[in-house]
Image (cartoon, grey):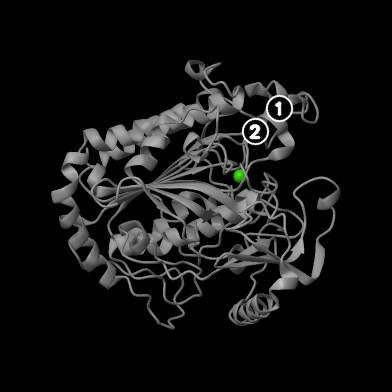
Amino acid sequence: MHQRLSFLAAFTLCGMTSALAMAQPTTSTSPAPAQVTPAGNDAAKRPNMIVIFCDDLGYGDLACYGNPTIATPNLDQMAAEGMKFTQFYSAAPVCTPSRAALMTGRLPLRNGMCSNRRRVLFPDSKGGLQAEEVTIAEVLQANGYATACVGKWHLGHLPQYAPTQHGFDSYFGIPYSNDMDRVASAPKGRASFADPKVEYWNVPLLRNGEVIEQPADQRTITRRYTEEAVEFITQHQKQPFFLYLPHSMPHVPLFRSAEFEGRSKRGLFGDVIEEIDWSVGRIMETLESLKLDEQTLVFFTSDNGPWLIFNEQGGSAGPLRDGKGSTWEGGMREPALAWWPGTIKPGSVSRDVASTMDLLATACTLAGAKLPGDRVLDSYDLTPVLLGTGESGRELLFYYRGYNLMAVRKGPWKMHLMTQDAYGAGARQPVKQDPPVLYHLEHDPSERSNVAEAHPEVIKAMLADIEVHKKDLVPAESQLER
Ligand SMILES: [Ca+2]
């Protein structure tokens, strides 16, 4: 693959320059909702985009991020041939708000996809992602891309919130988390996760609007998502496409297909990650065999950190503090890999702060589309980072838990206004930190040494940044409380 790099890099970069020029945010004040602008350039030259999104994968769960016993040769190859991010974040520490933010490039409280009472959507929820939100899929669909969602949605299971109502031509997957809909006869508490059986949960598997299997056979779900993904890529090889592949795994209950049983030194959790790694390899292989690898950006990351209360069945945040559910680094900083042979420099590492929310602006640039101009976005174009030509312009990262602004990051600094652990005694109530707590994340990624007293000027500047942030912040009514 590398021998093709040199002469095609120049070609692709030229294409990118014109795409970049077209991706300036609009300043339109048009009230029309969900309006996206078709691109005027040659559709054939626009790259495909694939977003592979794990569920509850921690910063320390891949070999290329230092895991000692999980083998991830395909993800390691993605890193070796592409770009590895070390300071990349999801937009929330739990599923629903994180996914809403990825899809819309907006903080969850701007679209109501968060709550201080119910942290995610449940099978009895009446809410979901609202029609007026503009998703990555809508932008790309309006610009001639074929679009598919394969995997866990979790942005509303009622028909009006389905992926096919939000810019996806097709959908195959489960509507919410794989641990929801537990049947009454299943073992109580965590016992059913220790030795999970398919029949303990009644989660449906859908194709478009139709339930095709219930309970979903979770043992084969990663394999079947992969087959769907490969088929979609193959069918749409002649036009630009967007594939969103949010895996159900490694969210508990953990399942893997028979070929992966007992394969990993890390046990069941490792088997699950190794099957996801196999899946990534199948996708890369398919792109290469169809000669689409140099026309496709593949981005791999996760929706939130590891679910630590599940002990061996939860992942690892590596050196980062806490995990899923918290706004400590382990809850939101994720492994993130970008692969685009011929365009991204092999073996590059980005230490820039970036967010899943940035994928919307990045997608607009790739498609030569305009950003939705009638709303506040929290999305910064990552193409200069991917191309190695510059920065995204992101200076601030806000850590929300529900509607509460818990912390802010600026450069190396992270200031906590409130702290709350994911679970245990420190989880009961948010603790207001007044004066705020300050960590230098590049010196102290584990958030162990509060250096607030030595840096009053940093605190002062960041408090001023928050005041500016609040000026354009209009929290929407919670969809999760409906
Ligand atoms: Ca999750």
Report the residue at 13% width, 50% height from top.
Answer: 7
Residue 78: x and y in percent read 37, 40
Label 1 beta carbon within 8 A of ligand 1: no
Foreground of the two, 4 or 12: 4
Quadrant in which ligand 1 is drawn: top right
Query: Tag 2: residue type?
Result: Val
Asked if residue 88 is positioned above or below residue 198 in the image, the reply reads below
Query: Tag 1: residue type?
Result: Phe
Asked if residue 416 is positioned above or below residue 316 in the image, the reply reads below
Residue 387: x and y in percent read 30, 58
The quadrant in which residue 59 appears is top right
Residue 252 - label:
2
Q: Give the secondary structure at mark 2.
A: loop
**Residue position for label 1:** 193
Foreground of the two, 238 or 252: 252
Q: Is the residue under label 2 in contact with that under label 1 (CB below 8 Å)? A: yes
Q: Residues within 10 Å of mark 2 (few under 14, many from 20)?
A: many
